Image (cartoon, rainbow, N blue to C red):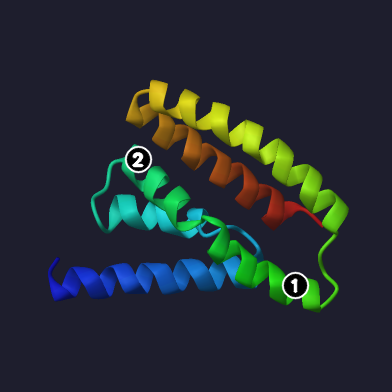
Amino acid sequence: MAVSTFLLVIAIGIVSGAMAGMLGIGGAIVMVPSLVFIMGFSQHMAQGTSLAVMLPPIGIIAAYNYWKAGQVNLKFAIILAAAFLIGSYFGSKFSLALPQPVVKKIFGFILLLVAVRMLLGK
C-alpha cells in the first residue's frame, strides 16, 4: 500500500470515527461513501469493509463514554442488539444477492430520507 493511500485510509477512519462518536451515526454513513468515491471500492466491498471495522471494540469505546454520562438505555440497547443481529444477517444476504448499482441506489435513498427528516424535522 502506498503511503498516500495509507494516509487517506487513516483520514477516512478518523473522520468516520469522529462522526460516529460525536453524532452516534455509525461510521458507515461516512465510511461507505468515502470508500466508494475516494478509494474506488465497489458498494459491496465498501459495506463489507465498513462492517468489519464496526466489530465490538470500536462501538464499545464510544458507548462506554455515553454510558458514563448516563446516556445509554441498556434495556433498549440489549433488545436492539438482538434484533440487529437478525436484521444484519438477512440484510447482508439480501444485499449480496442484489446488483451493486441497486444496492448503491438503496443506500443513497436511505441517506437522503434520513437527511430530509433531520433537516425538516423538529
Q: Please state which of residues 25 and 121 is positioned toward the viewer in this rendering.
A: 25
Q: Work out which residue is located at the far top of the displayed protein and give it.
A: 97
**Quadrant housing the C terminus:** bottom right
Q: Quadrant of residue 10?
A: bottom left
Q: Position of residue 89 (x, y in %)?
A: 55, 31
Crowding near the residue tagged with mark 1, few <14, some 14–19, many ≥20 C-alpha atoms within 10 Å = some
Compared across the picture, whether 80 is left or right of 10 comes to: right
Amino acid marked by disc 1: Tyr
Q: Position of residue 48 (x, y in %)?
A: 40, 44
Q: In percent of the image, x 23 and y 71: which residue is there?
A: 6
The disc at residue 43 is: 2
Q: Quadrant of residue 70?
A: bottom right
Amino acid marked by disc 2: Gln
Q: In percent of the image, x 75 and y 72: which residue is there?
A: 66
Q: In the rendered image, which residue does mark 1 sit on?
A: 66
Compared across the picture, whether 8 is left or right of 110 comes to: left
> Considering only order in the chain, which callout, 1 or 2, is on the residue closer to the N terminus?
2
| Label 1 secondary element | helix
Q: In percent of the image, x 63 and y 38: which residue is there?
A: 85
Q: Position of residue 51 (x, y in %)?
A: 47, 49
Residue 1 versus residue 75 in the image, above or below: below
Q: Position of residue 80 (x, y in %)?
A: 75, 44
Q: Please state which of residues 57 and 22 is positioned toward the viewer in this rendering.
A: 57
Compared across the picture, whether 93 is left or right of 44 comes to: right
Q: Please state which of residues 30 and 120 is positioned toward the viewer in this rendering.
A: 30
Q: Quadrant of residue 44?
A: top left
Q: In percent of the image, x 64 and y 32: which residue is there?
A: 86
- Closest to the camera, between mark 2 and mark 1, is 1
